Image: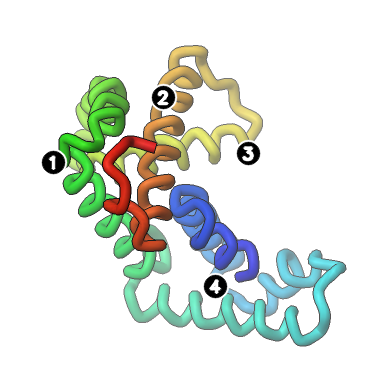
Amino acid sequence: MITASVKKRENIAEYLLYMWQIEDIIRANNLDIDKIQASVIDLYQDLTPQQKKEMREWYESLIDMMRREDVVKSGHLQLNKNVILALEDLHRQLLADPKFAAYSAQFYHTLPIIVELRAKAGENKSGEIETCFNALYGILMLRLQGKQISEETNAAAAQISKFLALLSHYYKKDYNNELFEDNQDN
């Protein structure tokens, strides 16, 4: 909860990956708030009892949303889908505006990786931005499991990360109403 709100303000890409991980943590605990209390919340030694109570309430609200939105076994909460939609919208705006040529160049440098990933997705194709997030999240999960990751995959992840970092930078500027104030990529 605390981490999520900081990440949402500072780096929307990290926020989204974090929230997807939270969804999986909730699933791993069978949507049982008492299990989450024991395996997650109680591990935060530096939180006050009030902060732990607020964290528990946050997890309870996410559990409730997951049940209502029928994403108990898989999928993402609408609030996380909305982040993807906002990023896709910003992505289209940036590509359409010649003032953001460096962004376009970064995207077109990443596009072959996206095309390859989408080809491997079969029936489960998603948009360009979500494909990037799916790739990074999959690699994150492999790393957490201690699995070997090829040099080629690491290189692709680095390029995707660079692209999403730039998109996140522009998202933050847009969020702060600073995006179209200047005329240069920065």
Q: Which residue is mark 3?
A: 144
Labels 1 and 2 touching (C-beta < 8 A):
no
Q: Which residue is mark 1?
A: 96
Q: Earlier in the sequence, mark 3 or mark 2?
A: 3
Which residue occupies 24% across, 39% down? 128
Q: Earlier in the sequence, mark 4 or mark 2?
A: 4
Labels 3 and 2 touching (C-beta < 8 A):
no
The three-letter amino acid code for the residue at tag 2 is Gln
Helix, strand or loop status at disc 1: helix
Select label 3 or label 2 by which is in front: 2
Select label 4 or label 3 by which is in front: 3
- Which image quadrant is residue 44 in? bottom right
Q: Which residue is mark 2?
A: 159
Q: Quadrant of the C terminus?
A: top left
User: Please, is residue 83 above or below residue 186 in the view?
Assistant: below
The answer to whether any part of residue 120 appears in the image is no
The three-letter amino acid code for the residue at tag 3 is Leu
